[in-house]
Image (tube, helix red, strand yellow):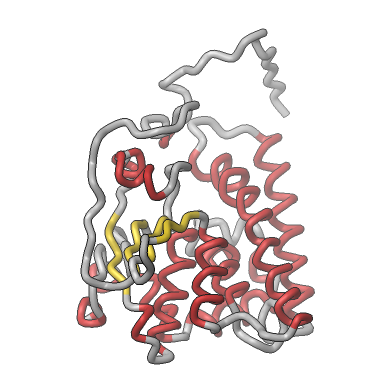
Amino acid sequence: MTKHTYTPPRVWTWDKENGGQFASINRPIAGPTHDRELPRGKQPLQLYSLATPNGVKVTIMLEELLELGISEAEYDAWLIRINEGDQFGSGFVEVNPNSKIPAMLDTSVNPPLRLFESGSILLYLAEKFGQFIPQDMAGRTECLNWLFWQVGSGPLLGGGFGHFYAYAPEKFEYPINRYTMEVKRQLDVLDRQLARHRYVAGEQYSIADMAIWPWYGGVATNQVYEAAEFLEAHTYTHVLRWAEEIGQRPAVQRGRKVNRTWGELDEQVPERHSASDFD
């Protein structure tokens, strides 16, 4: 193994060219970089997002609610091109000071409520509409256990494994080994849970599944980072069973398309304002 040594300076200095594929949008300060108002549509919920795994969590939830006939969950989905820095526009920063997708405005209340962080949005929608979260204390607690498991574990999969395996400008053995070990451990956690239950939090489909599926279901089925072979995803048989079952849900199939600008054309719905946009 080649040894790479690095001695941190006494005071860190930002190198704007350091960061690989996403160097142009990464910076050590918050706040807007330009003035840009966010568009508003006619629907009660205004979503500003991109079809990354974090964005897909919310569009799946919204489509599942609409599948149940809950018209109050109608939404406009506006495309935020994160590679072009849309998330640093002044309007977006007002909704999410952290400048990450997804972000949402609930305009059905006065004044409108801003929502950011995908786990928070899922929990808000589940409580607002009384769906996809168990109503008994034990079931609700287990659901939230797994929702927050994803919130805590996901960055190790995305910013950790995904960055060093797929996006880093140079490949180094130590970080790839470190994060691969952790992602495989997480997949094993899920596989053991899904060996005993149909869904992640039990026998009921919930926001826990919606949060976890885009990341871990995506990795297992080779939709995220194209790393299924590297991770030996075929060995996590219960995760694969669960991932494939959820992937067959009509609302999930629609949700995956929203704010998507890559892949096959029939898989892309860059902006969504009504059900007819899927036609």
Give the x, y percent position of residue 48. Answer: 34, 57
Quadrant of the rendering where the N terminus is positioned: top right
Residue located at (37% from left, 60% from top):
111
Q: From the viewer's perspective, tell me whether residue 95 is left or right of residue 200.
A: left
Quadrant of the rendering where the C terminus is positioned: bottom left
Q: From the viewer's perspective, tell me whether residue 28 is left or right of residue 66.
A: right
Q: Nearer the viewer, residue 3 or 102?
A: 102
Q: Is residue 35 above or below residue 129?
A: above
Q: Is residue 36 above or below residue 215?
A: above
Q: From the viewer's perspective, tell me whether residue 241 is left or right of residue 186.
A: left
| Residue 193 in view, yes or no | yes
Residue located at (30% from left, 40% from top):
89
Q: Is residue 15 above or below residue 125?
A: above
Residue positioned most to the top = 10
Q: Nearer the viewer, residue 54 or 181?
A: 54
Quadrant of the rendered structure where residue 250 is? bottom left
Give the x, y percent position of residue 221. Answer: 54, 69
Q: Nearer the viewer, residue 164 or 97?
A: 97
| Residue 237 in view, yes or no | no
Give the x, y percent position of residue 246. Answer: 53, 81
Residue located at (60% from left, 75% from top):
209
The image shows a total of numbered marks equal to 0
Quadrant of the rendered structure where residue 147 is? bottom right
